[in-house]
Image (spheres, helix red, strand yellow):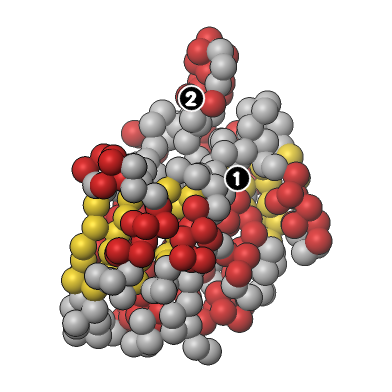
C-alpha cells in the first residue's frame, strides 16, 4: 500500500484497508521507534487557529523521527496580516518543506490547499468539517482498548455526547466507524445534534444510531463515551447555555452504573464537561488518548514521506 505524497484531507478519502494499514504502522512505530527515519526532511506547521495537541504532537512526532519543523502558530505574525492569500502562502511554504500540516478556520481550506500545493497537505482541522489525524488517533485508542473494533468479534457501542453539530472530531470519527462493527448512541443539546449527512452515512453503512434522552443513558449503555466540548459561542442565549452546560457535565458520581471497562474519550481541550474528579477513575482515558497522537502522527508522516 503506497501512501507516498498523499494528502490527508478527510477520513472519507480512506478505505477500511487503508485505515487498518495506518493503525498497523502506528503499532509498528510505537513498539519499534526509528529515530533517524526522517533525517533531512522538513515539516511545516501552518496553524491559522489555536491548537495545543495537534500542532505540538505533529512537531514532536517529526522531531522524534529525526526530521525538522518550521511554521507558525499565530497567522497574525505572518504576511497573511499584510493581505497575502492562502494560495500564495502555500506556494512559498512548499519550497521550504516536504510536508505541510495546516489548521484553518474555513471548512474546505485543506482541500483548497491541496489543489495549490506541490507537497502533501495534512489537514489539522478545517472549520467544522474534518480533523482526520485526530480520527486516526481516536481509532488507534479505541482499538488498543477494545481489539474487537478491528477483529469484528463483537459490536462495540460508542456514544457521542456534546456539540455534535460543530464538533469536527465527531464527524470524522463517525465516518471512520462506519467501516467497523459498531452501534452508535448520540446525545446533544437541541440545535447541536449530529448533522443529517452523517446520519445518512451511518444508515448507508447499516450502522445503527440511537438518540438517547440523557447523558446518563449514554454513560450506562456504552463501551466508549466520546465527550465533546459545548461551544459557548454557538449559543445565542447565554442563559440557555448555562442551563445546558449543567446537563452536559460528567462527574464521578455518574459513573456508578457504567460498564467496568467503559472508557471516556475526549479530543480535548475540556472546559466544564468532565469534572476533575473523573480523572482519578478507571474510566478516564482522555490523556492517554492524546498521548497516542505521537505514534499515529509519526506513522502518517512516515507513510506520506515514503519512509515506512
Ligand atoms: N484535539 C485537538 O485538536 O486539540 P488541539 O485543538 O489542542 O489541537
User: Considering only order in the chain, which callout, 2 or 1, is on the residue closer to the N terminus?
Assistant: 1
Residue at 63% from the left image edge and 28% from the top image edge: 189
Give the spatial CA distance, label 1 vs label 2.
Answer: 20 Å
Callout in the foreground (1, 2): 2
Are the residues at dot 1 and dot 2 in contact (C-beta closer than 8 Å)? no
Q: Which residue is mark 2?
A: 233
Residue 191 percent coordinates (x, y): 67, 28
Residue 130 percent coordinates (x, y): 54, 54
The one nearer the camera, 222 or 211, is 211
Asked if one can make out residue 295 in the rendered structure from this viewpoint, the answer is no
Question: For the residue with label 1, is its CB less than 8 Å from the closest atom of ligand 1?
Answer: no
Residue 63 percent coordinates (x, y): 19, 70
The one nearer the camera, 134 or 5, is 5
Q: Which residue is mark 1?
A: 160
Q: Quadrant of residue 94?
A: bottom left
Q: Quadrant of residue 202?
A: bottom right
Residue at 51% from the left image edge and 82% from the top image edge: 21
Residue at 41% from the left image edge and 74% from the top image edge: 118
* Image height of 204 relative to 198, above or below: below
The one nearer the camera, 171 or 215, is 171
Residue at 24% from the left image edge and 70% from the top image edge: 96
Q: Is residue 294 left or right of residue 210?
A: left
Q: Is residue 155 left or right of residue 94?
A: right
Amino acid at each position: 500500500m503506497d501512501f507516498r505524497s498523499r494528502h490527508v484531507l478527510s477520513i472519507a478519502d480512506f478505505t477500511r484497508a487503508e485505515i487498518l494499514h495506518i493503525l498497523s504502522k502506528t503499532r509498528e512505530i510505537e513498539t519499534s521507534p526509528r529515530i533517524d527515519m526522517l533525517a533531512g526532511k522538513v515539516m511545516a506547521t501552518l496553524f491559522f487557529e489555536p491548537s495545543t495537541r495537534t500542532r505540538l504532537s505533529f512537531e514532536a512526532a517529526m522531531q522524534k523521527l529525526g526530521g525538522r519543523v518550521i511554521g507558525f502558530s499565530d497567522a497574525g505574525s505572518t504576511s497573511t496580516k499584510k493581505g497575502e492569500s492562502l494560495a500564495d502562502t502555500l506556494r512559498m511554504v512548499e519550497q521550504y518543506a516536504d510536508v505541510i500540516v495546516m489548521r484553518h478556520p474555513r471548512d474546505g481550506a485543506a482541500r483548497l490547499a491541496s489543489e495549490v500545493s506541490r507537497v502533501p497537505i495534512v489537514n489539522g482541522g478545517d472549520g467544522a468539517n474534518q480533523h482526520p489525524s485526530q480520527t486516526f488517533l481516536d481509532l488507534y485508542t479505541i482499538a488498543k482498548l477494545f481489539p474487537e473494533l478491528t477483529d469484528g468479534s463483537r459490536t462495540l457501542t460508542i456514544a457521542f455526547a456534546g456539540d455534535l453539530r460543530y464538533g469536527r472530531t465527531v464527524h470524522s470519527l463517525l465516518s471512520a466507524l462506519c467501516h467497523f462493527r459498531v452501534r452508535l448512541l448520540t446525545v446533544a443539546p437541541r440545535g447541536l445534534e449530529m448533522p443529517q449527512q452523517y446520519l445518512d452515512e451511518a444508515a448507508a453503512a447499516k450502522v445503527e444510531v440511537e438518540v438517547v434522552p440523557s447523558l446518563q443513558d449514554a454513560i450506562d449503555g456504552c463501551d466508549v463515551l466520546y465527550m465533546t466540548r459545548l461551544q459557548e459561542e454557538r449559543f445565542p442565549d447565554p442563559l440557555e447555555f448555562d442551563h445546558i452546560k449543567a446537563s452536559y457535565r460528567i462527574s464521578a458520581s455518574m459513573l456508578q452504573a457504567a460498564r467496568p471497562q467503559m472508557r471516556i474519550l475526549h479530543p480535548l481541550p475540556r472546559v466544564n464537561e468532565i469534572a476533575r474528579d473523573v480523572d482519578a477513575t478507571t474510566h478516564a482515558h482522555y490523556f492517554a488518548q492524546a498521548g497516542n497522537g505521537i505514534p499515529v502522527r509519526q506513522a502518517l508522516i512516515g507513510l506520506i514521506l515514503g519512509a515506512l
